[in-house]
Image (cartoon, rainbow, N blue to C red):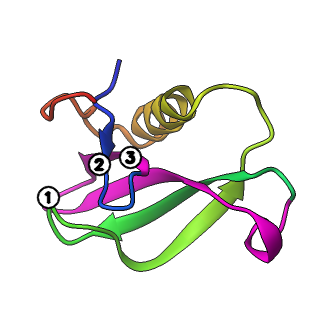
Amino acid sequence: MFPVRLDQSNQPYIQWPQGQGGYKRAWIQHRTGAADWAGTGRYLNIARTPDADSGPAGNATDFPIFCTSNDAQVLEAFVAAVCAITGCQFPVTVPEI
């Protein structure tokens, strides 16, 4: 199981090293109304971060979540797939929520 933390907006996220000195953050947003453009209520977001403990930087990419898996399961599956494909180390150094 990967370490899942909560950000300042109470959104679950996983942050991990990606390459030499780079980091990525994946997080789940819950949306309603016009912001819920796909009608799913939940979105997986991914963005770069400047370091291991900072928030997202730059533009995030969002993916609507159509499955019934919980937020932690979605994050873990996504990060595991990305790490397996890119060959980056799995994140295991921060405490879980």
Q: Amino acid at mark 1?
A: Asp
Q: CA distance from mark 2 to mark 3?
A: 7 Å
Q: Which residues are magenta?
A: 11-38
- Sequence-first tag of 1 and 2: 2
Query: Is residue 2 covered in magenta?
Result: no
Q: Is residue 73 left or right of residue 36?
A: left
Which quadrant of the figure contains the N terminus?
A: top left
Q: Amino acid at mark 3?
A: Tyr
Q: Position of residue 34 (x, y in %)?
A: 81, 76
Which residue is farthest bottom? 58
- For the residue carrying disc 3, how many other residues have a C-alpha within 10 Å: few (<14), some (14-19), or many (20+)? many
Q: Secondary structure at mark 3?
A: strand
Q: Taking 87 as reference, is 29 above or below it? A: below
- For the residue carrying disc 1, how many other residues have a C-alpha within 10 Å: few (<14), some (14-19), or many (20+)? few
The residue singled out by tag 3 in the image is 13
State the residue in front, 32 or 96: 32
Which quadrant of the figure contains the C terminus?
A: top left
Residue for point 48% across, 60% down: 46
Residue for point 51% across, 72% down: 60
Q: Taking 27 as reference, is 87 above or below it? A: above
Query: Is residue 13 covered in magenta?
Result: yes
Q: Secondary structure at mark 1?
A: loop
Q: Is residue 67 left or right of residue 77?
A: right
Q: Taking 82 as reference, is 42 above or below it? A: below
Q: Which mark is drawn over residue 15?
A: 2
In contact (CB < 8 Å): disc 1 and disc 2: yes
Q: Position of residue 79 (x, y in %)?
A: 44, 38
The residue singled out by tag 1 in the image is 53
In contact (CB < 8 Å): disc 2 and disc 3: yes
Q: CA distance from mark 1 to mark 3?
A: 12 Å
Q: Nearer the viewer, mark 2 or mark 3?
A: 3
Residue for point 42% across, 66% down: 47
